[in-house]
Image (cartoon, coloured by chain):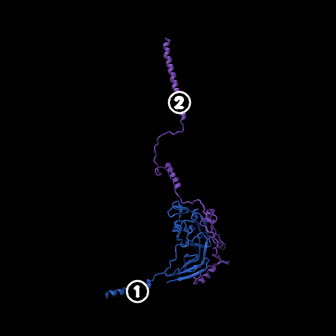
Chain colours: A purple, B blue
Amino acid sequence: MFESYLRPLLLLLAGAVVALLIQWGISNRSQSSRVAVPASTPALTLQRVEPVLTPNQSNETPVPRETVLRAIQKAKSQFAIEPTASPPTMSMQPDGLPLGVRRDAVNLELYKRLGIPPPLINYDGRDIGQEATQMIQTHREPMPFPGVNPNASVSPMPFPQSVEEGNEQAKAYALPSPSPSVQ
Amino acid sequence: MKRSATRVFLSVAAILCFSNPFAKAQETPQINQFFYPDLLDAKLKVGKDGNTRLIWDIVSNHGTNYTGSVLWILSPGGSLLATGTPNIPANVGFGKNNEAGKSVFNVSNTILYAQASGNTTVALLFGQENDGTSIGLWTYNSAGNLIASVTYGPYGSFVVHEAYFDQLTGKLIVKWRQQNGTNLFTHLVWGVNEFGGIESIAGPFGPFPNIELGKVNLSGKNQLWYWMFPKNGTPDHGINIWEISPNDVIISMATYGPF
């Protein structure tokens, strides 16, 4: 009598154990698969494409448009040739002077007599750009006209009728010292 | 008979017309020029090497903020061969003012010349006024490198009345003048080579009442001065031409008119 009740009870118990084992096994498997997938992997979702708003259509900053424009400008800057100065690379002539420079570019003796600084000439191939820029940006105080007597009395004179008369008139402006010769 | 009478009548009428003092032409030697004649024209020149020299004026803020100029050298096919280094600074100025103080040239105050040597000379006409107190000159070689620089002035009461490149020689003519009264001026002219070096000095001459100095050209290193007389008071004028050596000696004079 007891045996007739025990058999179905054992079968039920065994079935429950098997069910527990299966449940444990499934839960264990799902846990291990969750660890294997990186948490940062983005979810693959469909996003709605927003239309680009012009400033007139929205007060908000149009971020997508700016990004596109920035990219276009960057691309332009990479390819476009803009009118800016190129880095100096001085070519030299066989005589040792920079390309285009002549040894007799300036009559230094004349400048010595006039009492003014001569032009800045690039005789050695260095970069004179900064020096030249500063030269024309520097404020200069007025000085007497070089080679002209500042104390000459300037009064109207008759128009010369001969070469001699004209040259005589010019002497009124000559400096007391020997006048500068250009030749 | 009737036809020949008509011919005689027309001939007599023509002779009377030409001999009429009221039909006399007014003779004026055209020796004047604009203050800075090259200012609008000399931003682009082709040299003897066939290459083009071109100045870019860099202006921002709707044309109100001039920040300088850049020289470009282009091949005949338009390829960019070189750019000028460094840029021309903004203190050269942008535009000249007319007598009413209104800006009339909306371009940089620069003029250039493509030299036979391959160099490019840029004259810097500082300031907004036509009669500026200073003038500068920069020369770039064919690779765009700056090889010469000079600034002249200010010198007392002398001003740069006109400055332009002699088209034959490429030298810069700098016409200085000093005002000594109403319509009275003392004149002094420099011939400046492509490196900014003074090569010829002529003057001062004057002041001469009622005489006007017009163009000055070069013949070799000699200067040719063209005077017009009288300046005012009559529609008929004569011309007087001086040839002056580089060391300020008048070599010759020639006078024509008034006729």
Residue at point 63% right, 78% down?
Answer: A173
Q: Which mark is residue A29?
A: 2
Q: Position of residue A141 (x, y in %)?
A: 64, 69
Which kind of residue does numbered mark 1 sit on?
Ile
Q: Position of residue A26 (x, y in %)?
A: 51, 28
For the residues beneath circles 2 and 1, the answer to whether they share a chain is no
Determine the residue located farthest toward the left in the rendered image. Answer: B1
User: Which mark is nearer the camera, 2 or 1?
Assistant: 2
Q: Nearer the viewer, residue B101 or A133?
A: A133
User: In the picture shown, does residue B24 fall above or below A44?
Assistant: below
Residue at point 50% right, 21% down?
Answer: A15
Bin the neighbour count of mark 1 within 10 Å (Cα to Cα): few under 14, some 14-19, many 20 and up: few
Regarding residue A67, the answer to whether it shows in the image is yes
Q: Secondary structure at mark 2?
A: helix
Q: Which mark is residue B15?
A: 1
Q: Nearer the viewer, residue B65 or A40?
A: A40
Horizontal relation, residue A145 to residue B11: left or right? right
Q: Position of residue B19 (x, y in %)?
A: 43, 86
